[in-house]
């Protein structure tokens, strides 16, 4: 029943494999999937952490989610496909998937990371989930990754789409700030041009007092949606960059 690490009882890779029904053939690979770099720093006998697998899993997820959406929503535009894919693979969403697997209690962490609450840290859970996807791909191939991940997509897609279309970017940006206990986004119309019947509006949106997105459209509503989408793209890229640097 698990391994005792300090005062903590953690799940072994074999126990996790059985409980989650993963069917890993290569247990050494699954052990690497579950090994955070903080564990390597404190356990010299451990050979490799999961960061390379995280990189691989990130790429595999982008492909699988993109192909899944392309095949199931033939009428959806490229822009909307990109928006939905971003929502499905963002840090918060992948961390939620990891929580559903109770992945945190199986990840091998250093004591410092444990004390700081690493088992519930969203960036760590997201990275662990990506590493797991990378591991499944290496262990059994892309088809098994699709079978593993499709139930997660099916569950999440209902919250991402409204009447078959992506949710409004402004709502998604609002949720992004709320999840981090930040002030709500602030929208400001910075420019109006053109004749009355062909007005063009420029709107910017600020997050934490900094302009994060700018949009231009024939209505303030359209311009603000485009500004929110640009902000989401920038914040997602920044978050992924920080996550890779951790």
Image (cartoon, rainbow, N blue to C red):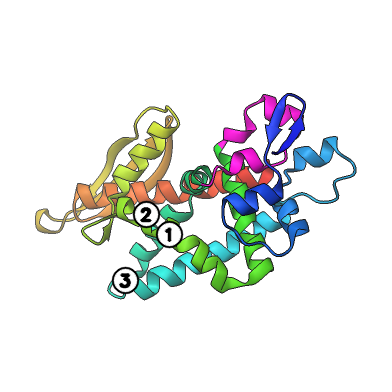
Classify mark 2: residues with Cα within 10 Å, few (<14), some (14-19) or many (20+): few
The answer to whether any part of residue 205 appears in the image is no
Secondary structure state at the residue bearing disc 2 = helix
* Residue topped by disc 3: 73
Q: Position of residue 127 (x, y in %)?
A: 61, 48
Secondary structure state at the residue bearing disc 3 = loop
29 horizontally vs 58: left or right = right
CA distance separating discs 1 and 2? 6 Å
Camera-side residue: 42 or 175?
A: 42
Secondary structure state at the residue bearing disc 1 = helix
Classify mark 1: residues with Cα within 10 Å, few (<14), some (14-19) or many (20+): few
Q: Quadrant of the N terminus?
A: top right
In this rendering, is residue 44 above or below 178? below
Q: Quadrant of the C terminus?
A: top right
CB contact under 8 Å: marks 1 and 2: yes
Name the N-terminal-most of marks 3 and 1: 3
Q: Position of residue 120 (x, y in %)?
A: 57, 34
Which residue is at a point 42% across and 27% down the rendered structure image?
Answer: 181
| 152 in magenta | no
Q: Position of residue 12 (x, y in %)?
A: 71, 44
Query: Can you tell which quarter of the image residue 218 is in?
Result: bottom left
């Amino acid at each position: 029943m698990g391994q005792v690490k300090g005062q903590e009882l953690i799940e072994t890779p074999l126990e996790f494999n059985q409980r989650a029904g993963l069917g890993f053939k290569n247990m050494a690979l699954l052990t690497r999937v579950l090994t955070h770099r903080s564990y390597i720093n404190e356990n010299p006998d451990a050979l490799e952490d999961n960061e390379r697998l995280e990189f691989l899993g990130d790429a595999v997820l982008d492909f699988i989610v993109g192909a899944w959406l392309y095949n199931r929503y033939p009428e959806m535009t490229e822009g909307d496909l990109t928006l939905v894919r971003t929502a499905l693979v963002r840090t918060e969403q992948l961390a939620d998937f990891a929580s559903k697997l109770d992945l945190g209690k199986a990840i091998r962490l250093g004591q410092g990371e444990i004390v700081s609450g690493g088992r519930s840290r969203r960036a760590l859970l997201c990275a662990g989930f990506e590493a797991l996807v990378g591991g499944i791909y290496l262990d059994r191939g892309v088809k098994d990754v699709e079978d593993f991940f499709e139930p997660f997509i099916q569950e999440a897609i209902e919250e991402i789409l409204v009447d078959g279309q992506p949710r409004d970017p402004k709502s998604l940006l609002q949720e992004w700030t709320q999840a981090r206990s930040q002030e709500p986004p602030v929208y400001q119309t910075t420019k109006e041009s053109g004749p009355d019947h062909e007005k063009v509006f420029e709107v910017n949106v600020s997050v934490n007092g900094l302009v994060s997105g700018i949009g231009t459209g024939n209505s303030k509503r359209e311009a603000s949606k485009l500004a929110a989408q640009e902000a989401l793209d920038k914040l997602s890229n920044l978050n992924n960059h920080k996550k890779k640097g951790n």
